[in-house]
Amino acid sequence: MLDKPYVIQARRPYRCLLLLLATIVILVVAGWFWSKEWRAAQSDKLTSLQSQYEQLVSENQRLTGENQQLATQLENINQMQALQQATDTQLQTELQSMQEKIIALNKELLFYQNITQGNASSELQVRELHLRPVADDPASFMYRIVLTQGTRITKAIKGDVLITLNLAGDGKAQSRLLDQHDLKIRHVQVLEGTLKLAENERPESLRIMLRQADKTLTERTFKWEVSPSPAP
């Protein structure tokens, strides 16, 4: 067999270098295109994220405003409920007080009707005495005196009403005149006023005397008893 013949080729010293350069250029161009696409994708993603962020900020501001409005409404509702509760309590107290006054007035009306119709005692008398303290002055007291008589008369009985304070002493009777009113009664007369105790006075009783000229028509002594609430 004959040996394979040798082929003699011309030397190409720059071929490898050109291939290497071409490869590098292709890689650089491919990398540049990839980098451009990547930056474009990242830019689009960033734009989308910024848009979402702005929407979230706007939504957060809207929700914050609505929350503030709801908080204000809730506070107003709580205030209205507290006011309503206070009003209901006050109205309940006033209603109870009014009912008690109505009961007392009905009793008083019935009493006056009995007097005017002649169903009660016909004698001239000091019927009631009510005492209650003055809120801003511990030494002062308001009094209310009810005088009645059931005799049918055409002219009023006239005279004076003397109010005398009897004091508790060391075995000695002490008294002083507190107030005086004009007596003018046909059926019922109500006298009201304020008395003031002197320093260190210890009241024991009040004497109510009805006088006409120098004649005592009637009198009555009441034990000193102070009511915490106004007289009916």
Image (spheres, rainbow, N blue to C red):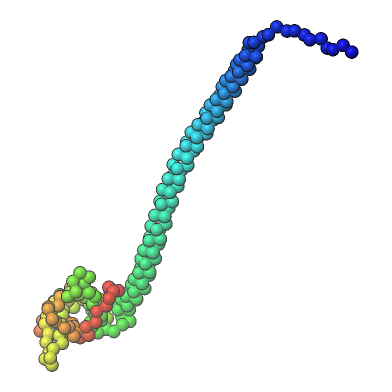
Position of the N terminus by quadrant: top right
- Left or right of 209? Residue 79 is right
The location of residue 121, given as percent across then percent down, is 29, 84
Furthest-bottom residue in this view? 171
Furthest-right residue in this view? 1
Q: Residue at x 21, y 83 (%)?
A: 224
Q: Residue at x 18, y 71 (%)?
A: 137
- Count of picture labels: 0
The location of residue 170, given as percent across then percent down, is 12, 91
- Left or right of 175? Residue 126 is right
- Can you see residue 193? no
Q: Nearer the viewer, residue 178 or 119?
A: 178
The location of residue 149, given as percent across then percent down, is 25, 80
Q: Residue at x 30, y 79 (%)?
A: 115
In the image, residue 10 above or below residue 133: above
- Left or right of 14? Residue 46 is left
- Left or right of 29? Residue 124 is left
**Which quadrant of the figure has residue 216?**
bottom left
The location of residue 47, given as percent across then percent down, is 52, 28
Q: Residue at x 40, y 51 (%)?
A: 76
**Which quadrant of the figure has residue 143?**
bottom left
**Which quadrant of the figure has residue 10?**
top right
- Can you see residue 179? yes
Position of the C terminus by quadrant: bottom left
Q: Nearer the viewer, residue 231 or 137?
A: 137
